[in-house]
Image (cartoon, rainbow, N blue to C red):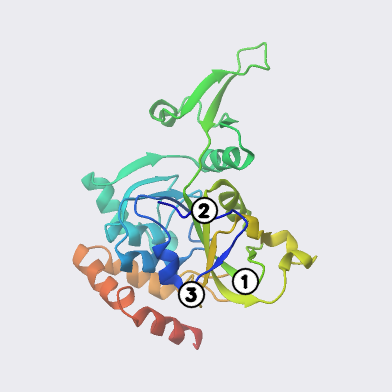
Amino acid sequence: MLQNLPANETRFLTNVEDLAAAIPDGAFVAMPPDYSLVAMEAVRALVRRGAKNLRLLGVPQLGMCADLLIGAGCVVEIETSAVSLGEAGLAPRFTEAAQSGILRIKDATCPLVHGGLQAAEKGVPSMPSRGVIGSDLAKHRVDWKTIQNPLSAQNDPIVLAAAIEPDVALFHARWADRAGNVWIGRRRELGTIAHASKRCYVTYEEMRDGDMLEDELLAPGVVSSIYVTGVAEAKRGAWPLGLIGAYPADDAHLQQYAKAARTQAGFEQYLDEFVRTGRAARQRDLAAHR
């Protein structure tokens, strides 16, 4: 059961393991793509605790975070517009799970993922769109309804995409502050998932004193503590993905993962070396001093 906390009471969690423990098995978890602010250390902590039956929402797509969780047996369903490792190629554990049929997949599009979240953010049941009219997707998504535009006298079909309300929003941030706010900069999709989700857990690089909402320069990039359920420190918490303004993506490591994860045996070896032990922390320390 999700913890019944007031929406404006941010919990300052002791570590990432505690944050992962707060995300229940079976939760519907919204996560950003690899080019955004991904809570990779929290993903590794979910694998370590043996999370089960998670349903993932890609906002609007998924990458290494999903591939790790799928390969480790933590996921039963995903809803996304794509799963990819970008320049490192296909997501191998996702690809094998999809081809074998052990993973339920709800195909989506970027606009309708964002639209569904915006509907939940605004407290309305659906968001209108047009882009999927006539596509196969519209035939297979029972939660998308094609109707006549009620404001038009002409033949004007529109699609209503049902509101998407995740159980949990999970992402990484450059800063949190003592007031419980987190700074996401220009990654506004993270603000949307924080607003739309029942709970929001965030890992952060650094703690700032004071209240960032009182800083005119920082405030536009802040998610208010009203929407933040809990935060935990995670130095280099997006690694091997990058954090804009702090550190770049570790492309060599991403290629290493993509190669290892082509087989289940290689993937298990990767987990043993970089996820289930303290090796990941040492690797990040080495990368930080290159």
Task: Kindly identify which residue carries mark 1.
Answer: 175
Q: Residue at x 65, y 64 (%)?
A: 181
Task: Kindly identify which residue carries mark 2.
Answer: 199
Looking at the image, tell me whether mark 2 or mark 1 is earlier in sequence order.
1
Q: Residue at x 63, y 63 (%)?
A: 184
Task: Using the rendered view, name the quadrant where residue 186 is placed.
Answer: bottom right
Q: List x then y, in percent, for residue 146.
A: 51, 22
Label 1: which secondary element: strand
Q: 106 and 26: which one is in front?
A: 26
Label 2: which secondary element: strand
Q: Which mark is residue 14?
A: 3
Looking at the image, tell me whether mark 2 or mark 3 is earlier in sequence order.
3
Confirm or deny contact between disc 2 and disc 3 (CB under 8 A).
no
- Calculate the distance from the C-alpha at mark 1 to the C-alpha at mark 3: 16 Å
Q: List x then y, in percent, for residue 7.
A: 59, 53
Q: Which mark is residue 219?
A: none
Depth-wise, is mark 1 or mark 3 nearer the camera?
A: 3
Task: Using the rendered view, name the quadrant where residue 284 is placed.
Answer: bottom left
Q: List x then y, in percent, for residue 110.
A: 52, 43
- Calculate the distance from the C-alpha at mark 2 to the C-alpha at mark 3: 18 Å
Badge 2 density bin: few <14, some 14–19, many ≥20, Cα 10 Å = many
- What amino acid type is highlighted by mark number 2? Arg
